[in-house]
Amino acid sequence: MASAIDTAKADAPQRRQAPGRGWRFPGSRLGGLILALNLLSLLILLGGALTLNEWRSNLVEARLESLTSQAQLLAELLSDGGVTAGDPQPTLNPLLASEALLDVFIPQGQRARIFDGDGFQIADSYVVSSRIDGEPLPPALPADAPPPKAADGVTRSETRRAQADAELYMEVAAALEGQPQSSLRRNELGDRVVSVSIPIRHVQAVLGVLTIEAGDVDETLAAQRRALIPFALVAVAVTLLTSLLIHLFVARPILRLSSAADHVRMQRSRAISLPDLEDRKDEIGNLARSLETMTATLSDRMDAIEAFAADVSHEIKNPLTSIRSALETLDLIEDPEKKARLIAVVQADVRRLDRLITDISNASRLDAELSRDAPRPVDLSKLLGEIVTVYETTSKPGEAPVRLIDRLEPSPKGGRPRGVVVGRETPLGQVFRNLIDNARSFSPPGRPVAVILERAEGEALPIRVRVEDEGPGVPPENLETVFERFYTSRPKGTKFGGNSGLGLSITRQIVEAHDGRVIAENRTGPDGGVTGARFTVALPEPR
């Protein structure tokens, strides 16, 4: 048996396939990269803020512990240092309390105050040490301008002092209940201070409260803000780097693809080719490969259209030349019999030309029809049965009969028929009609044409339709060229001009559009002789 020719793979261009997809950020690699870089900058800033906030909290807690220890020690010294007076109910002596504060070392930046049992201040380390409590002077005002006042008519300084006194009084009042107090509040200058208030006891009686406050909190917070600056700068740098990477890896490649598309549109090239972008494993690489494949396909389609136009021109010129020659000769012939034969030739060429133009029109509309018709399940058993029935009812005496042989096993009850493919019913019907018409044109009168529907288990394209005839077969060297456009080589004795040479070409185009293939081969008998031709259409199963 002659070797079968797989025409679906003939002259098929090799396209660059997209690389396999590994794990990636849901939906987009670039999206994941952009999100990761932006989150990185935010995490740097957030991490710096959390770190410094933790450091600030630890620092304030450590300061409070240090002041508490210092205040407790000083309160015991005051309690045992003879600053009480009166019997049997002792009270704090303001003079002795002031002298005690004068004798005790109070570090720079700290302030110690003593309050009696009623919450009145009786001693202040700033006073006994001759320290002057002041604040920066405000900007100079015009001579006739009134001093700035708050909403109730008092100055801002007076308002701050009142608020500071109220917070201090609340802390002292709580300490007079017998429990040490600590807080972070503002003093009369508006500065934040760490304050500790310790009860001064005589045995179990609370005689007063010792308050020590440190005013270096603002300096600590300023240092904290300065420490946050490097984190902010790093976050800004990461954001700028992210923007630069987006520009380099997203914006510029897209601009290059746009420029390449404009280049193709201006007809300076036939296809987009950007190898450095096509090798990328992200969406930009997918886009570049898709554009390259698309433009290459369009270029191939343009080449095919040009070749088709050239073939059409050549095929139309043959009958036109024959008609023109016959018409020029017609007036020179006197013999009625010869003139009748010449007129018959002209009529045959006209019919051939009409058939040729019809087939060319069908071939040129094929792509548009395939794109407009949405694929749907097609039962080949039913489709082939309807086609064969039409041939049986319209067959004329002497024409080759058509027989359908359905070798598919019955489908399970309620299951999908075993001969179903996903495709377009009208083009598929045209495929089988073309093959049947071709087989009938080569079959001897009265000899049947068999249409066989079967399955090839284990094959990538398991559904097979074979059209077999008992004609002279196909020359082995033409098993592939029979699918080329305008191939019309026929055996001797066959009527010339009965075919346009487009039927099998259209068949191959439709089958390949359905992800199938069509092959041609010769049938042989026991003695090795050719007994006919066989055309096999292989189609995939629905997924």
Image (cartoon, grey):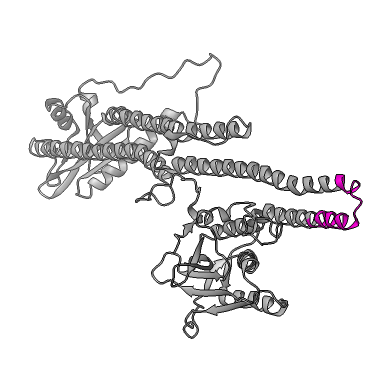
Nearest the eye: 123 or 312: 312
In percent of width and height, residue 224 lies at 29, 31
- Which image quarter: residue 375? bottom right
Residue range corresponding to the magenta coloring: 328-348
Task: Give x and y (percent) for residue 183.
Answer: 27, 41
Residue 385, how many percent across, how many down?
61, 78
Q: Residue at x 80, y 55 (%)?
A: 345
Above or below, comparing residue 473 to residue 402 in the picture: above
Q: Residue furthest top?
A: 143
Residue at horizontal 21%, vertical 27%? Answer: 125
Residue 59 vertical position relative to residue 389 in the rendered view, above or below: above
Q: Quadrant of the N terminus?
A: bottom left
Front residue of this view, candidates 45 and 177:
45
Which SS does the magenta portion mostly show? helix
Q: Assess whether residue 333 is covered by the magenta stretch.
A: yes
Q: Residue furthest bottom?
A: 413
